[in-house]
Image (spheres, coloured by chain):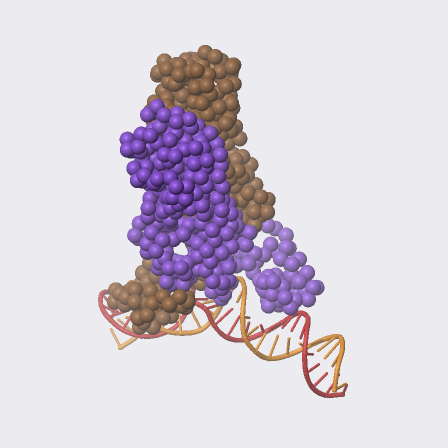
Chain colours: A brown, B purple, C red, D orange
Amino acid sequence: MTMGNTGGRRKPPTIHDVAREAGVSRGTVSRVLNGGHYVSPTAAEAVNAAIRRTGYVVNRHARSLITGRSDSVGFLLTEPQERFFEDPNFNVLLRGCTQALAAHDIPLLLMLAGTVDERRRITRYITAGHVDGVLLVSSHSGDPVAEELRAAGVPLVACGKPIGLGSKVSYVAADDRDGARDMVRHLLALGRRRIGVVTGPQDTPGGVERLAGYREVLAEAGVECDERLVVSGDYSRASGEAGAKRLLARAPDVDAVFVASDLMAQGVLTALHRAGRRVPQDVAVGGFDDSPAAVAASPELTTIRQPWDRISAEMVRVLLAQIGGEDPAAVILPTELVKRDST
Amino acid sequence: MTMGNTGGRRKPPTIHDVAREAGVSRGTVSRVLNGGHYVSPTAAEAVNAAIRRTGYVVNRHARSLITGRSDSVGFLLTEPQERFFEDPNFNVLLRGCTQALAAHDIPLLLMLAGTVDERRRITRYITAGHVDGVLLVSSHSGDPVAEELRAAGVPLVACGKPIGLGSKVSYVAADDRDGARDMVRHLLALGRRRIGVVTGPQDTPGGVERLAGYREVLAEAGVECDERLVVSGDYSRASGEAGAKRLLARAPDVDAVFVASDLMAQGVLTALHRAGRRVPQDVAVGGFDDSPAAVAASPELTTIRQPWDRISAEMVRVLLAQIGGEDPAAVILPTELVKRDST
DNA sequence: TTCTCTACTGTGAACGCTCACAGAAGCATG
DNA sequence: CATGCTTCTGTGAGCGTTCACAGTAGAGAA
């Protein structure tokens, strides 16, 4: 048997070739390929041997043409790509989804919808049925692409609770609010009472929920919720530094800061250092995400870990279930407090 | 006209529907779709109008079935995924490739070949013709997947010069050696003469070339090439720190260090700081990559910028040319010295 | 007129697969 | 012995395209 290693691409064997080789019909080969029900053991064995011998791989285009499925899913990132691509957690998510899908032999198509043109092109591509479903990373409110896909009945699973989309859309998210609660409780347990917060953007679910958790715990502990202690950021390092400066100016007696992302927390550490405050002695700092930035910071950050590997696995599971006809579902996964040197 | 926004997925219109709507035949519609030669202006106009009215999108599976092309390409990452996924430059590369392909209406399939099983599955998938070509990020020597693909005649473009693959494989790379030369010349120009180096792994082209550039410039400048000044790392932060310690122990009079990656350079800065050396006064430090780590470090790192956006664009250009029948090509792109505070 | 050439259009076949259906064989049941 | 049931197998049709080829119409040349 000569393999096609001469440089030119050989025509791959078809189901016909396998059938001839195994001495059965196309139908039998097809049945072996798809589950193997109603096939005699001897026939199945002959077919499998023929497949091995010929190196046959199913032609997915031909299959898709008749089944109407594409057996592929899209990984769609809308809006501010920079923010996500610089976030190492995004990488973990992308990798996790790719691997979880690979286990089902389903390729992942990476789709970046930045410009209006790209959005339209991608929407058309998806609604035309070229993917069976979409893993959506958007987290921005009122995403028109997401709404369009939902309306077109495309199976869809969002990462993080989508704002402004009806309850009809599946999502998988970490329990942001509970994570925030854990962190603030931790700060209270250290004896801190003037606890500031640098929030995330309030048009993202994470931003909203983390702030809500902060407020809840303070209220529950009977600590005054001083609005001077609340400043807003956009998850960037620079906004963390600026936020901490504002915080110090408005409430110099601050003795702890809950920061809604590790990247911002890095900025907060810088600002505190410049202001001559020691961490954690004078001010304790808690981050969120457990990103590499957390261990790169000095002192290393106490932070909230989101279970990104489980999130990606769940996203794929829910999407495949939905493609299989099940109803949309929401999955919330627990977070974990990681204690390090900044508190 | 009712759009399919009722929740269920409607059957999309076919080329037949468009033909009927436009009052022409399938053949004419097909010709309009593929370049529009030998089509009368009136027919073309009618077809385009019908396409707009029906919202027709070509069924790529049916097209692929007959053309034998898939009109998609794979982005293949082999071996140590962590190393790459943590590297922000990898993100720029992935994003750039996706966008460059999108401009040609070609989807990118993300493929991660970690385990042996995954490798085999992906190799089969690719050689079966499910993608037209592959963008390869491997940089590891003697990659069996790459060799297999090359042997099967799959169009292939590597990122970085592949070691041990014949000259038959295309690649796009930054000029590592020249970048290293620039950096070491820069250090020499500052008056430093005891210039150490923390190398990258010597089974990667980048690691080899950057060290070669270092040696070249020292030889050319007539500076003694003291082997005690050469220590090896693996691109990780930790290996940079360990390397610097070794360097200080073996050559306490070192007055500059060329580090083959920014991440390692961060580790070097930490080690120097702990040893009480001031940067850049006592020891100048030069990195490589211009990653976010470079500006996150203190002092901010002087480094070598690789043109990642151009690399991705070139990889796609070369791959598409090769899919179109052209011969393999090698492209080397210039680097740039970015001066900051560490030198 | 007739022929040739160019510009355009329509049609059947084919790509490789799955699906529905029909049929065969084996075996138990009436 | 017919009948039904179960298990298995083969066959034709068809998915939505493209491609090759045949055919038409109109212009210009002989």
Percent of width and height locating residue A149: 53, 45
Residue closest to the eye, A329 or A160: A160
Residue A26 drawn above or below residue B237: below
Residue A190 sits in quarter: top left
Q: Exactly how many numbered labels are in the figure?
A: 0
Percent of width and height locating residue B313: 51, 50
Percent of width and height locating residue A217: 41, 19
Residue A72 drawn above or below residue A188: below
Residue A135 sits in quarter: top left
Residue closest to the eye, B231 or A62: B231
Q: Residue furthest front?
A: B222
The residue shown at (51%, 26%) is A239
On the question of residue B106 being in view, the answer is no
Residue B247 drawn above or below residue D19: above
Residue A340 sits in quarter: top left
Quadrant (top left/top right/bottom left/bottom right) for the C terminus of chain B: top left
